[in-house]
Image (cartoon, rainbow, N blue to C red):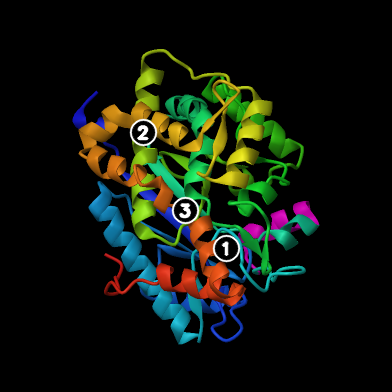
């Protein structure tokens, strides 16, 4: 394997909520903000299912510095576009305030079949995620890489947890987005696939059954991308901290690289029990990196911080090759200081006000980096 193959490009997609600065509620203005932002970054800004949201995408990046610059730049573009509509931008997995009842949906042709198929499920879909794409050139390899990633998905949930509040109420979960987002027919941890043909056959069957109405409704938390030569990891909450986003993306890339190395040695991945994996999801969604988590590989409880160290150890050879081991290790050694959920709750505890939580998120999402323009 060449050095270029060992350090593939990666890209990040982030979804954000639009916020009314007076009420601190989510604001149904996605289409308006999209029109403004798309004049600056036309191919990298898009709408989402609801009018409360907006999405931005980095181009393929080579390393942490490159990714950091693009994340800051695209947040700056969206912050400016939102401000021109009298609004703010906030990175949180769920809306802290103002999303009770049916949500306003975008009138977008790509979503219309899903609106018909999934009915009222669409009306509660107010979740914002962080998606990381890592280049994997072959579908067969990509499918088997997904098998290797499955047992690590709960750890990524714990590390990224940033959605304890919903509609002004503390849910008791670190990632309510994860806990509440599994009701879609094709969502959550993916099945174990034996081959690319197995993957394609199941996707066809799900389509024939009406459970999937296009590639964009295959909402598994890790999957081969439908339109890019990548593996897409979708399990994480969007994070207000750019630095934590960059570290997580680097760790995800290294995990994909090490998984691909095992695939090419003939290992199709561990057949983790689906029931254990779902239980591990629940535990990580509830507790984040605090306390113990369920190790989906063994079925035993272990300190969540130990599972993070296990993940870094698994990814270590690829992190060494990319030159990112020191940065990722230093960041993950400080897990007690991590955690969007903990920081949201700390903001609430100051005065017992969900408005303070929104202000915290807006402050830490907004970038002061100069605005980018599309290359």
Q: Which mark is residue 22?
A: none
Q: Secondary structure at mark 3?
A: loop
Mark 3, residue position: 339
Distance between mark 1 and mark 2 Cα atoms:
32 Å
Residue 188 in sight here: no
Tell us which disc is closer to us: 1 or 2. Answer: 2
Q: Which residues are magenta?
A: 107-119
Q: Which residue is mark 2?
A: 312
Is residue 33 rendered to the left or right of residue 67?
Answer: right
> According to the image, label 1 marks what residue?
48
Give the percent coordinates (x, y) of residue 214.
63, 46
Residue at 48%, 24% (x, y): give it.
144
Instruction: Give the image location of residue 121, x and y in percent.
Output: 75, 55
Front residue of this view, candidates 63 and 100: 100
Q: Is residue 145 above or below residue 128?
A: above
Q: Nearer the viewer, residue 85 or 285?
A: 285
């Amino acid at each position: 394997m060449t050095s270029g193959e060992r350090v593939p490009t990666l890209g990040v997609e982030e979804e954000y909520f639009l916020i009314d600065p007076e009420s601190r509620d989510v604001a149904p203005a996605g289409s308006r903000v999209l029109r403004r932002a798309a004049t600056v970054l036309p191919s990298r800004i898009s709408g989402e299912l609801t009018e409360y949201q907006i999405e931005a995408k980095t181009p393929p990046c080579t390393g942490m510095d490159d990714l950091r610059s693009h994340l800051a730049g695209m947040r700056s573009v969206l912050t400016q576009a939102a401000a021109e509509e009298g609004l703010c931008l906030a990175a949180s997995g769920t809306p802290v305030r103002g999303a009770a009842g049916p949500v306003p949906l975008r009138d977008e042709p790509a979503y219309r079949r899903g609106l018909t198929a999934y009915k009222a499920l669409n009306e509660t879909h107010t979740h914002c995620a962080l998606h990381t794409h890592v280049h994997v050139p072959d579908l067969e390899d990509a499918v088997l890489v997904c098998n290797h990633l499955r047992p690590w998905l709960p750890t990524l949930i714990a590390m990224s947890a940033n959605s304890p509040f919903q509609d002004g109420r503390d849910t008791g979960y670190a990632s309510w987005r994860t806990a509440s987002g599994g009701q879609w027919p094709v969502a959550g941890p993916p099945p174990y696939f034996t081959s690319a043909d197995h993957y394609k056959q199941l996707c066809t069957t799900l389509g024939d059954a009406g459970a999937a109405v296009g590639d964009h409704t295959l909402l598994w938390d890790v999957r081969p991308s439908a339109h890019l030569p990548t593996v897409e990891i979708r399990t994480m909450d969007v994070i207000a901290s750019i630095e934590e986003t960059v570290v997580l993306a680097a760790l995800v890339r290294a995990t994909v690289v090490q998984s691909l190395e095992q695939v090419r040695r003939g290992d199709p991945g561990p057949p983790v029990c689906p029931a254990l994996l779902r239980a591990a999801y629940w535990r990580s969604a509830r507790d984040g990196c605090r306390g113990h988590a369920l190790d989906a590989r063994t079925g035993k409880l272990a300190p969540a911080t130990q599972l993070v160290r296990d993940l870094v150890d698994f990814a270590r050879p690829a992190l060494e090759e990319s030159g990112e081991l020191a940065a990722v290790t230093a960041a993950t050694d400080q897990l007690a200081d991590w955690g969007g959920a903990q920081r949201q709750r700390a903001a609430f505890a100051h005065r017992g006000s969900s408005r303070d939580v929104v202000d915290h998120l807006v402050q830490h999402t907004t970038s002061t980096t100069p605005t980018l323009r599309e290359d």
